[in-house]
């Protein structure tokens, strides 16, 4: 079994920065990709950043240039650096990871429990 734990959320003023972490633990052979999603009140969960093996990243226009996703493969940890935060970035942020638990089996998507980010003055 694999567990993902997010941390780093909190209250920040508009224009401020936060760095979220997503730590994966358990039986991990490899992590194919990691994503960050967010879900505001009454809204659907939306993708905000992806990172794939080889380092390729992807962002929607709403966060491009402000958010940066990265990974430390040795630590099985992903990060989301969020700069120039706006009130509309307020949401619960979730990470997920596509994980292989052995060399021959299929990959499985795991989710963390979420961390609250509130941008307000």
Image (cartoon, rainbow, N blue to C red):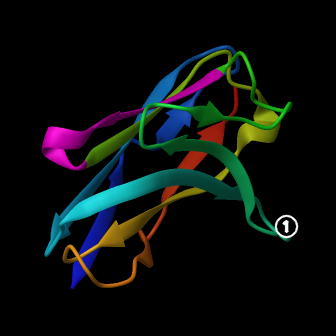
User: Magenta segment: does it hold 39?
Assistant: no
- Who's the residue at 76% across and 27% down the image? 86
User: Magenta segment: does it hold 72?
Assistant: yes
- Who's the residue at 41% across and 68% down the image? 112
Give 77 or 20, whichever is nearer the viewer.
77
When asked about the image quadrant of residue 65, the answer is top right
| Magenta segment main secondary structure | strand
Residue assigned mark 1: 43
When asked about the image quadrant of residue 16, the answer is top right
Q: Measured from the top left, where is residue 70 in percent x and y?
A: 42, 31
Give 42 or 30, whichever is nearer the viewer.
30
- Who's the residue at 19% across and 77% down the image? 102
Q: Measured from the top left, where is residue 3 in percent x and y?
A: 26, 73
Please state the extent of the stretch shown in magenta in the rendering. Answer: 67-76
Residue 17 as seen in the image, left or right of residue 25: right
Q: Residue furthest front?
A: 104
When asked about the image quadrant of residue 99, the answer is bottom left
The quadrant of the image that shows the N terminus is bottom left
Vertical placement of residue 84 versus 104, above or below: above
The quadrant of the image that shows the C terminus is top right
Q: Measured from the top left, where is residue 72 in percent x and y?
A: 25, 35
Residue 73 as seen in the image, left or right of residue 35: left
- Who's the residue at 35% across and 43% down the image? 78
Vertical placement of residue 19 versus 75, above or below: above
Tag 1, which secondary structure? loop
């Amino acid at each position: 079994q694999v567990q993902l734990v997010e941390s780093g959320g909190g209250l920040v003023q508009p224009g401020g920065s936060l760095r979220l972490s997503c730590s994966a633990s358990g039986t991990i052979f490899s992590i194919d990709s990691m994503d960050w999603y967010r879900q505001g009140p009454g809204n659907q969960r939306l993708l905000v950043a992806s990172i794939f093996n080889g380092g390729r990243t992807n962002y929607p226009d709403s966060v491009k240039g402000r958010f940066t996703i990265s990974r430390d493969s040795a630590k099985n940890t992903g990060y989301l650096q969020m700069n120039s935060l706006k009130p509309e970035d307020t949401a619960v942020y979730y990470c997920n990871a596509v994980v292989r638990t052995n060399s021959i089996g299929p990959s499985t998507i795991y989710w963390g429990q979420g961390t609250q980010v509130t941008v307000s003055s």
